[in-house]
Image (spheres, rainbow, N blue to C red):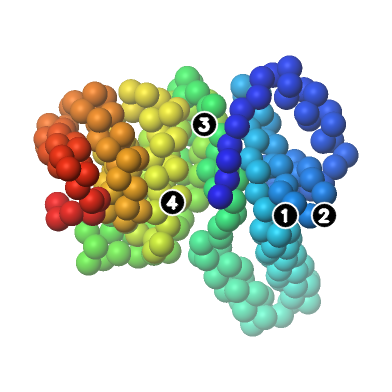
Amino acid sequence: MLFPARITRAAAAIALAGLAASGCNVDGRWTRTGGPSGPVTLVRATGQGVDMSVVPTQEVDLVENVLSHRQAYRAGLEELLAHYRAQGCAEKVAWAQYELQGVDLVKQFRYLLDSEVPSGSLHPTDRIAEADANYAKGLELMRKGGHGVPIIYREDRMLEAAEVFRQLIENYPTSDKIDDAAFYLGEIHKEYLPNQDPIAVNWYERAWTWDPNTPHPARFQAAVVYQYRLHDRDRALELYRQVVEHETDNLSNVRFATRQIEELTAGGAPPGGTR
């Protein structure tokens, strides 16, 4: 379980100075500090200061081990491919290329949720042509993957789309498309990839955190996941109330949210009822 907290810019400068020489980065996103036993504090610089999370040492060590071996495996394959190309061994070049393509098609987790999903302090303020093009590419990949048409579902296309959306957010963090990309990352993790509901609701939350007026029904989708899949009645109720307040353009969702509010507050009805 992660326990995020936030500190000010002044405290961030002191913290980062003290952490500069300690620990190692988790997937290039966090600076790690902490002893060999007990919890580890992960500190991530953001545009508005620092995000901090406390994670058990063993989990961080195991995650770092996986990430390190993952990078080494890819680097080894790339070196082998270069060797076979230099030797003119076309057959083995094809083998190495095929294996690398397989690596790219595997969904790779960062496992620590605060590393899986970027900081909530980003602001979508700029119109950036490259980001717009990436967003359009991601939507097209989702279409080819069968978005909305499960009979032609292709997981490889959905994984490609997820990576395009993720790269958009990482490369253009001020783009006015980051909340849109976050919403569709939530959709991909919710609808098309198994057992990834905690990641999905985090992406939905980023959509409305980055842009409180996002045109997507991110709060509604998150509320449904919390109620029916994660069985978190209180969080679902909180989000249904936000749907009624903020997502008034979709009357069907507002009506459904209103019914759920009534049911969940009437005698403590359990979550996960029939929709």
Residue pointed to by mark 3? 120
Task: Find residue 5 and report its horizontal and vertical position in percent.
Answer: 60, 32
**What is the three-letter code of the residue carrying label 1?**
Thr
**What is the three-letter code of the residue carrying label 3?**
Gly
Residue pointed to by mark 4? 198
Q: Residues within 10 Å of mark 4 (few under 14, many from 20)?
A: some
Label 1 vs 4, first from the N-terminus: 1
Residue pointed to by mark 2? 36
Could you tell me how far apart the alpha carbons at marks 3 and 4 are, in whole angstroms? 16 Å
Could you tell me how far apart the alpha carbons at marks 4 and 2 are, in whole angstroms? 28 Å
Label 3 vs 4, first from the N-terminus: 3
**What is the three-letter code of the residue carrying label 4?**
Pro
The residue lying toward the viewer, choosing from 6 and 249, is 6
Q: Residues within 10 Å of mark 3 (few under 14, many from 20)?
A: some
Secondary structure category for the residue under label 1? helix
**What residue appears at the point 17 percent right and 43 percent down from the top-left corner?**
267
Could you tell me how far apart the alpha carbons at marks 1 and 3 are, in whole angstroms? 24 Å
